[in-house]
Image (spheres, helix red, strand yellow):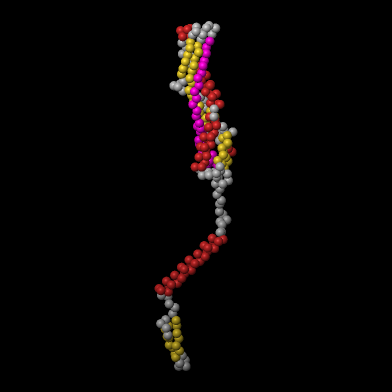
């Protein structure tokens, strides 16, 4: 008999002795720990197999949501926040001659004045009215096309400290009797008019377009656009 078996004797009716063997199942601490360990290993194997099967099948949540990101409004806001971009500025000088004459000889009446006018003209691009239809972004968000209004010239800003009379000839009567304090005003007006015309004929608008394009290309590249950035002016 083994250590887990206990003999039990008893008498029968015919006088013979019967031996009955009962076996008690062991429930010791060692057996319990072994069963727990085997169970844990089994659970790990099951979860590992389930994870592998799930990765292979790629089950999707039928109630999942799809997120779409559009960058046009963000780009439009970044550009429109500029409001007005001072793209270029030019300094101009002009010599204006103003003559006043009469029926008398010039040594008696009349004047001939030479005036140096110095002023600056700025060119800017207006972003304030830029709409969403003026900013087109490619589907891969790498390229963009922007349509802007043409640069506009600011009014002439005449520098009174650099504008002055450089020469003047007057008749006798003008030197004696003509003390008009506003005699410089017509010179300022004419100089402003001449500078304005010179600015319109200059390359100031072309330079402003070039500088604006370079500025926008740098801005979009900093926002992650690595493709072609086209800027059109209408």
In the rendering, at what x and y percent does residue 179 appear? 46, 10
- Quarter in which the C terminus is drawn: top right
Q: As rendered, which of 215 and 112 lies closer to the eye?
A: 112
Answer left or right for 44 relative to 60: left
Magenta-colored stretch includes residue 165: no
Residue at x 53% of width, y 21% of height = 194
Residue at x 55% of width, y 40% of height = 229
| The magenta segment | 72-101
In the rendering, at what x and y percent does residue 92 appear? 50, 25
Magenta-colored stretch includes residue 98: yes
Q: Is residue 163 above or below residue 40?
A: above
Q: As rendered, which of 22 and 192 lies closer to the eye?
A: 192
Total tally of numbered discs in the picture: 0
In the rendering, at what x and y percent does residue 47 appear? 50, 64
Residue at x 46% of width, y 20% of height = 163
Please say whether residue 164 is visible from this viewpoint.
yes
Q: As rendered, which of 93 and 185 lies closer to the eye?
A: 93
Q: As rendered, which of 127 and 216 lies closer to the eye?
A: 216
């Amino acid at each position: 008999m083994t250590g887990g078996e206990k003999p039990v004797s008893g008498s029968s009716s015919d006088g013979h002795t019967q031996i009955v063997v009962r076996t008690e199942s062991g429930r010791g601490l060692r057996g319990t720990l072994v069963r727990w360990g085997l169970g844990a290993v089994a659970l790990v194997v099951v979860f590992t197999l389930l994870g592998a099967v799930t990765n292979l099948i790629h089950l999707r949540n039928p109630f999942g949501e799809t997120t779409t990101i559009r960058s046009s409004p963000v780009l439009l806001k970044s550009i429109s926040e500029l409001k007005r971009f001072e793209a270029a500025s030019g300094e101009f000088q002009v010599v204006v001659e103003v003559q006043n004459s009469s029926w008398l000889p010039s040594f008696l009446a009349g004047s001939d004045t030479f005036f140096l006018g110095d002023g600056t003209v700025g060119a800017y691009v207006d972003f304030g009215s830029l709409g969403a239809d003026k900013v087109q972004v490619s589907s891969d968000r790498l390229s963009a096309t922007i349509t802007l209004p043409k640069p506009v010239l600011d009014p002439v800003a005449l520098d009174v400290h650099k504008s002055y009379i450089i020469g003047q000839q007057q008749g006798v009567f003008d030197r004696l009797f003509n003390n008009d304090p506003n005699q410089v005003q017509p010179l300022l007006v004419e100089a402003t008019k001449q500078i304005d015309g010179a600015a319109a004929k200059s390359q100031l608008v072309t330079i402003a377009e070039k500088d604006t394009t370079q500025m926008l290309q740098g801005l979009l590249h900093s926002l992650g656009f690595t493709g072609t950035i086209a800027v059109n002016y209408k």
